[in-house]
Image (spheres, rainbow, N blue to C red):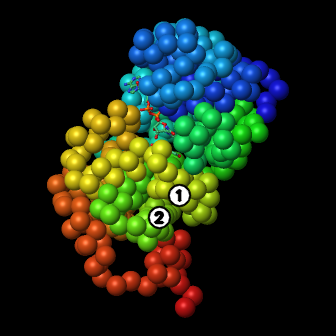
């Protein structure tokens, strides 16, 4: 844990922003938790609760809610961005004119931007002028807010092109319940975190269709293969995908009842349409937009991503879910070893 206590702004008072604010508050930092919903900020300051996103959790007194973005970022050196990927540019646009000093921006979101096909750290670098940006750090891993807010053991990874900055963020968050690793492979960390939501949606769908653990294991392993294939083609280190932000996050998101992506998929598998599902959720389901982005990326990079393609058909082209599973199962036969080596950019030895 860092000995130096800081003032830190957490931007986004949804489930993840609030849970991470709690970790920082437990480490005795002064936490400013900004949210755009004034009623929620009033609740945080008066009752020390966030009943919409983390019911029954009491927030430490050193988390103070802010509705003014200007006051939240005043004199701050570290900003934690915890809004959905879709909102990042808009919120950064508001923040940039307000910061007079250089800041380190830590993003904790999991997505890729459709059409631009940028990772979140790249979006941040586009939005924040270099003169105001000390470093961009990503924090990612198998970490449902519901369990972090109960102070249950959790591990995550931080990554950055500036590893000194990543180590500072590791120190800021690390405590006995929240163990933070570093990994210099920012491409792999961001790609793994974003794309696991696609596979979680698919795992939810198979559950909704009444399929069991075999189907789930199939999706996790073959999902990892296609994530690694795309990630490696984009310059990631293939080893990252067998780590915390790869297989680790895939396991938790495909198997936990907390996962919004899994729950959304489950409803789709049971026959609900996408609009109904998203309305029902009331929280962000990042995998929907990321499926579009990953589909576009796979086409651009020329990488085979059959699960992503099938899900794209379900979400955006009204393909039947059961038919999509059937067509995945009846694809041309394959040699697994050859495929795995292809993902690693090498040739099979036998
Ligand atoms: N909830 C979790 O357990 C985890 C979430 N994440 C990631 O963290 C990011 C945020 O997710 P959650 O906090 O779970 O979402 P959430 O749906 O619980 O909360 C999102 C927050 O952002 C706010 N927001 C949405 N659009 C906004 C805008 N245009 N301007 C300002 N604020 C806006 C919402 O009002 C809400 O307070 C996502 O990318 C998610 O994948 C990552 C790890 C764990
Ligand atoms: O990223 C997460 C856990 O690591 C949260 O997943 P969901 O967005 O599916 O709830």
- Judging depth in this view, the residue of 144 and 94 nearest the camera is 144
Q: Residue furthest left?
A: 318
Please, what secondary structure does the residue beneath circle 2 have? helix
Marks 2/1 in contact by CB < 8 Å: the verdict is yes
Q: Which mark is residue 145?
A: none
Between disc 2 and disc 1, whose residue precedes? 2
- Judging depth in this view, the residue of 124 and 277 nearest the camera is 277
Q: Quadrant of the N terminus?
A: top right
Which of the 4 quarters of the picture holds residue 5?
A: top right
Instruction: Provide residue 292's location: percent of width, then percent of height.
Output: 30, 50
Q: Is residue 80 left or right of residue 162?
A: left
Q: Residue furthest right?
A: 3
What residue is at 42 percent from the left and 11 percent from the top? Answer: 38
Q: Is residue 215 above or below residue 103?
A: below
Is residue 242 something that shows in the picture? Answer: yes
In this figure, which residue is indicated by the disc labeled 2?
Answer: 220
Instruction: Provide residue 42's location: percent of width, then percent of height.
Output: 49, 9
Q: Is residue 266 above or below residue 55?
A: below
What residue is at 30 percent from the left and 72 percent from the top? Answer: 328
């Amino acid at each position: 844990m860092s000995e130096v206590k800081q003032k830190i702004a957490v931007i986004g008072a949804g489930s993840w922003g609030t849970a991470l604010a709690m970790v920082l508050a437990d480490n005795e930092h002064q936490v400013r938790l900004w949210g755009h919903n004034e009623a929620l900020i009033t609740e945080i300051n008066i009752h020390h609760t966030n009943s919409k996103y983390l019911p029954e959790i009491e927030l430490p007194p050193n988390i103070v809610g802010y509705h003014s973005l200007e006051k939240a970022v005043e004199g701050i050196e570290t900003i934690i961005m915890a809004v959905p990927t879709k909102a990042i540019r808009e919120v950064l646009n508001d923040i940039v004119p307000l910061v007079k000093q250089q800041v380190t921006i830590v993003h904790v979101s999991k997505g890729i931007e459709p059409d631009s096909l940028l990772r979140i750290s790249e979006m941040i670098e586009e939005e924040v002028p270099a003169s105001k940006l000390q470093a961009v750090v990503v924090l990612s891993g198998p970490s449902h807010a519901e369990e972090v807010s109960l102070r249950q053991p959790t591990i995550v990874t931080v990554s950055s092109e500036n590893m000194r900055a990543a180590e500072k963020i590791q120190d800021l968050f690390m405590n006995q319940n929240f163990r933070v690793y570093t990994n210099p492979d920012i491409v792999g960390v961001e790609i793994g975190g974003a794309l696991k939501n696609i596979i979680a949606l698919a795992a939810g769908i198979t559950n909704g269709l009444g399929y069991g653990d075999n189907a789930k294991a199939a999706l996790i392993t073959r999902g990892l293969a296609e994530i690694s294939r795309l990630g490696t083609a984009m310059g990631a280190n293939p080893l990252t995908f067998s780590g915390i932000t790869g297989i680790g996050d895939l396991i938790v998101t495909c198997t936990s009842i907390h996962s919004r992506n899994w729950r959304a998929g489950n409803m789709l598998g049971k026959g609900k349409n996408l609009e109904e599902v998203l309305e029902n959720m009331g929280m962000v389901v990042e995998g929907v937009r990321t499926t579009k982005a990953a589909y576009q990326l796979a086409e651009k990079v020329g990488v085979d991503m059959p699960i992503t393609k099938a899900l794209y058909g379900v979400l955006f082209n009204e393909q039947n879910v059961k038919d999509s599973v059937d067509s995945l199962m009846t694809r041309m036969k394959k040699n697994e070893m050859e495929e795995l080596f292809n993902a690693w950019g090498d040739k099979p030895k036998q």
